[in-house]
Structure formats: structure tokens, C-alpha cells
Image (spheres, rainbow, N blue to C red):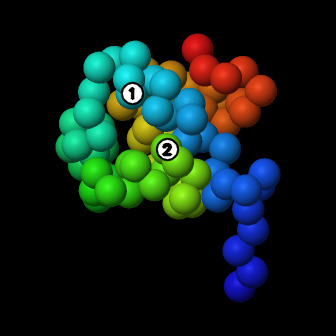
Amino acid sequence: MKIYDFDGAKNVSGDCIHRARTAMRLSQADLAARMQVNGVTIEREAISKIETGDRFVTDYELMVFAKVLGVSMDWLVKSDTGGQ
């Protein structure tokens, strides 16, 4: 299977995830813990890679990120908004 990048990144949501997380004053470890409480097994290192665009984000992870961060999935994938 061919893996594609978009503008050099493996996801378009990492920057928005980072902005929402820091706005909530959560560490990457705190976010990982909240994700795990909501059924998604993810480690702090994976959060870091997502935020830097070095890891893909699955649809179910995106759904739980939106829930935990209190934003819409649409907001997380809008690369032109630059955040909230």
C-alpha cells in the first residue's frame, strides 16, 4: 500500500489538536490519558507525532480527539483556519 503525505505531513489535524490541547492547558500525557478513558489506546509519543504531522490519524481517533478537546471534527481538519 502506498502511503501519501499532504504538504509534507501525514495528517492535517495535528496543528489544530496541538492548539486545542494547549488552550485547555493539557500535557500530551494528559491528553493521551483522556483518550484512553474514552476507548482509544494511544501513548504520549503518538500524540507528539500526530501534532508534528509524523503520524496518521484514524477516523475513530479523530472522533475521540474532537470529543475530548471539545471541538468539532470539522474544525480539526480545517487546515486553512489555523486554529480556533
Picture residue at 56% right of the left edge, 30% below the top = 16
Q: Eyeballing the image, is 31 above or below 4?
A: above
Q: At x 23% / y 43%, what residue is drawn?
A: 29
Label 1, secondary structure: give it: helix
Specify the amino acid type for callout 1. Answer: Arg
Q: Are marks 1 and 2 in contact (CB under 8 Å)?
A: yes
Residue 80: quarter of image? top right
Q: Which residue is mark 1?
A: 21
Q: Position of residue 79 (x, y in %)?
A: 72, 33
Q: Is residue 59 visible?
A: no
Side of 28 where 3 appears, left or right? right
Q: Which numbered disc covers residue 12?
A: none
- Judge whether 75 appears above or below 41 on screen: above
Q: Position of residue 17 (x, y in %)?
A: 49, 34
Residue flagged by tag 2: what amino acid is it?
Answer: Glu
Residue found 40% across the figure and 49% down from its top: 48
Q: How many marks?
A: 2
Q: Residue at x 71, y 85 (%)?
A: 1
Residue picked out by circle 2: 51
Give the class, few, some or many, for how many residues have Cα within 10 Å of label 2's Cα (few <14, many ≥20): many
Whether residue 26 is visible: yes
Q: Is residue 7 left or right of residue 44?
A: right
Q: Position of residue 41 (x, y in %)?
A: 29, 58
Up the image or down, 2 lies above or below 54; here it is: below
Q: For mark 2, give the secondary structure.
A: helix
Give the CA separation, mark 1 to mark 2: 10 Å
Whole-percent x, y for residue 70 in the image: 43, 21
- Camera-side residue of 36 and 49: 49
